[in-house]
């Protein structure tokens, strides 16, 4: 199945009554909600995008025409979303193999989520593919041609959900590390949260990081280590930020949580970095790639990668330790292997340099004082 036969159906025909404002035209950064929704599908490789309009449609036509999407008017929009889905399906020619159903007020879907849903559809041919984040189904589901007749002949009782539930045995849930699949904007508070998510979308939330660990089946032991590294990194980042230094605490926390994402696999730092990069997090990927070996000159500024590197070396398993405690077992184990020993000593020296710089920046006189910061 090629993506050209997958339709992106965006429903933007409702009243926005609970919101108290016309949702499709609310700003998200320099664009509107409806533009952002279109971008989410288009940037994921969906070329055939159709937008169902109804209420205040005249205000949407000029914008949507500039976006070069098909605009379909639902004159019966007062009947609810199911009527819009019917209106959209009636434009299908018979060649369409599936469609994403995306409410226009759920605009922040990550590219990797769309690609994962299509991949699973290709593998399984299931009737419905649902994105799931933290155990909760979100949008957009990918609905196959198996359901078209049932939808078109449905009487609307129970809405689309009633029809989808009839295909439960032929549906698949796909875990995605994408909080955006759950973020709609029914209320002003929803809108505020969505804007906050948008403004930091280049760094995954802690929940999304945990979603990555689940998605890639990282062991619980490794996850617990990452939680402790994130805790240490967060505290150091907050202290440095409070002292006036430019540090993104969220990026440090994300690095701590997923630095060992691919632990147990060959060259796990680079493998983990590729996983993270494939999800669109390039800054985080660099931190994951360098968490074991980091080139750090004495004059280099302390940054997020340096803090994650240090925090990782201050945690043994799930316990806070000193650098000497952390490196002692490895130094003893590989005492007879000069090449490996040199690598270990290099990492220890780098960690000591970073630790010394952080202590100096924070005005801590001794290593013990730095450890005592809680």
Image (cartoon, grey):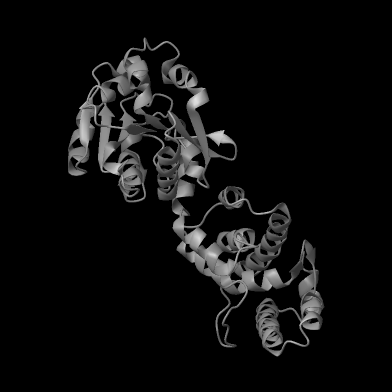
- Please, which residue is most extreme toward the bottom here? 338
Residue 53 vertical position relative to residue 359 in the rendered view, above or below = above
Out of 344 and 186, give the one closest to the viewer: 344
Q: Split into 4 quadrants, where in the image is the N terminus? A: top left
Residue at x-position 57% and y-position 59%: 250
Residue 150 vertical position relative to residue 71 in the rendered view, above or below = above
Residue 263 percent location from the top left of the image: 64, 62
Residue at x-position 56% and y-position 87%: 299
Q: Split into 4 quadrants, where in the image is the C terminus? A: bottom right
Residue 311 percent location from the top left of the image: 68, 69
Residue at x-position 76% and y-position 74%: 370
Please tell me in which quadrant of the rendered image residue 369 appears.
bottom right
Residue 45 percent location from the top left of the image: 31, 48
The reply to whether residue 344 is visible in this rendering is yes
Residue 128 percent location from the top left of the image: 44, 30
Out of 214 and 267, give the one closest to the viewer: 267
Relative side of 366 to 282, left or right: right
Please tell me in which quadrant of the rendered image residue 98 appears.
top left
Out of 267 and 24, give the one closest to the viewer: 267
């Amino acid at each position: 199945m090629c993506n050209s036969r997958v339709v992106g159906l965006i429903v933007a025909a409702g009243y926005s009554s609970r919101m108290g404002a016309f949702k499709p035209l609310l700003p998200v950064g320099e664009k509107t909600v409806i533009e952002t929704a279109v971008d989410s599908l288009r940037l994921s490789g969906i070329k055939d995008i159709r937008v169902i309009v109804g209420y205040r449609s005249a205000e949407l036509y000029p914008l949507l025409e500039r976006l070069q999407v098909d605009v379909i008017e639902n004159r019966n929009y007062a009947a609810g979303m199911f009527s819009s889905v019917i209106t959209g399906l009636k434009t299908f020619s018979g060649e369409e193999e599936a469609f994403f159903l995306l409410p226009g007020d759920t605009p922040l879907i990550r590219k990797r989520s769309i690609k994962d849903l299509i991949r699973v559809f290709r593998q399984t041919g299931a009737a419905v593919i649902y994105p799931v984040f933290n155990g909760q189904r979100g949008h957009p589901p990918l609905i196959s041609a198996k359901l078209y007749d049932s939808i078109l002949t449905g009487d609307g009782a129970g809405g689309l959900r009633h029809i989808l539930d009839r295909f439960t045995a032929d549906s698949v849930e796909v875990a995605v590390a994408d909080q955006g699949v759950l973020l709609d904007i029914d209320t002003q508070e929803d809108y505020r949260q969505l804007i906050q998510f948008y403004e930091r979308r280049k760094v995954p939330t802690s929940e999304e990081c945990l979603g990555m660990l689940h998605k890639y089946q990282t062991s619980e032991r490794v996850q617990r280590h990452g939680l402790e590294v994130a805790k240490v990194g967060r505290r150091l980042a907050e202290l440095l930020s409070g002292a006036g230094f430019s540090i993104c605490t969220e990026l440090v926390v994300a690095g701590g949580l997923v630095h060992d994402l691919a632990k147990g696999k060959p060259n796990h730092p680079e493998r983990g970095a590729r996983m993270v990069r494939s999800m669109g997090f390039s800054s985080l990927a660099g931190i994951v790639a360098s968490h074991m070996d980091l080139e750090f000159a004495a004059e280099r500024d302390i940054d997020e990668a340096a803090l994650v590197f240090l925090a990782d070396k201050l945690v043994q398993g799930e316990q806070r330790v000193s650098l000497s405690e952390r490196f002692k077992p490895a130094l003893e184990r590989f005492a007879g292997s000069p090449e490996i020993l040199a690598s270990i000593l290099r990492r220890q020296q780098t960690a000591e340099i970073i630790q010394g710089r952080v202590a100096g920046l924070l005005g801590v006189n001794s290593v013990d004082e730095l450890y005592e910061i809680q």
